[in-house]
Image (cartoon, grey):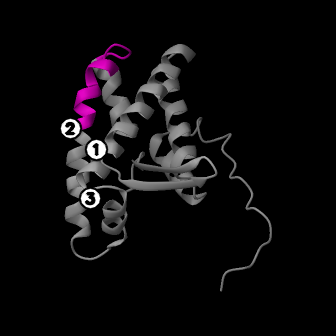
Amino acid sequence: MAKTHYGRPPKPKTDDLVKAPGWDDFYRKCGDRGIRGELLENLILQRVAQELDLDAEKTDALKKLFQAEQQAATKAIVDNAGGWANFERQNNDKGPAAGVRYEEWKRQRNIVRDSYTADYLKILTYDKLNVFNEHLRNTQIEVANTYSTEGDYHLVGGVGKNVK
């Protein structure tokens, strides 16, 4: 039985992650610490920027472009599902069709991603874009929902790689 705690959970320590000796070690440590979502995305971007020797201006431009791409892909996927209610119903269905549905979402996201590639190539060389793609524009799928007084936010994202 899990232990009961009161208050908010402590934030995971991340100082050592960007400097982890390799990507596998980085992903393993992130997984061990339960790091996902936006925090994982930001840490991966920091590592990629460090590995590719990108300055702050290029890193910021990449982050903004990546976020715009994620929003456009989410909108396309939700619209193709027939709106948010249908998307949410499909996402909650974990039956046999879930794998087929995720593959369809990946296909739709790839169509949007392809339309952004030329913009990425204005910032990165082709080889550097491949490194960026490997860690931030890969095949992971994760649905994130955030609810606030400003409204509901939904994102079909997914970054990183599963540790082998």
User: Quick one: SS at disc 1?
Assistant: helix
Q: Which residue is mark 1?
A: 76
Q: Going 20% across and 47% down the picture, which residue do you hit?
A: 107
Q: CA distance from mark 3 to mark 2?
A: 14 Å
Please report whichever mark, 3 or 1, sits nearer to the chain's N-terminal start: 1
User: Quick one: SS at disc 2?
Assistant: helix
Q: Is residue 130 visible?
A: yes
Residue 9 - label? none
* Residue kind at label 1, given as amino acid type: Ala
Q: CA distance from mark 3 to mark 1?
A: 14 Å
* Residue kind at label 2, given as amino acid type: Ile
> Toward the viewer: 102 or 159?
102
Q: Is residue 103 left or right of residue 20?
A: left
Q: In the image, residue 47 lies at what x, y percent?
A: 52, 32
Q: Which residue is mark 2?
A: 111
Q: Is disc 1 in contact with disc 2, using a CB cutoff of under 8 Å?
A: yes
> Toward the viewer: 140 or 70?
70
Q: In the image, residue 33 lies at what x, y percent?
A: 61, 57
Crowd band around label 2 with a 10 angstrom C-alpha radius: few (<14), some (14–19), many (20+): few
**Residue 67 quadrant:** top left
Picture quarter with the N terminus: bottom right
Q: Establish if 22 lies above or below 11.
A: above
Q: Which residue is mark 3?
A: 102
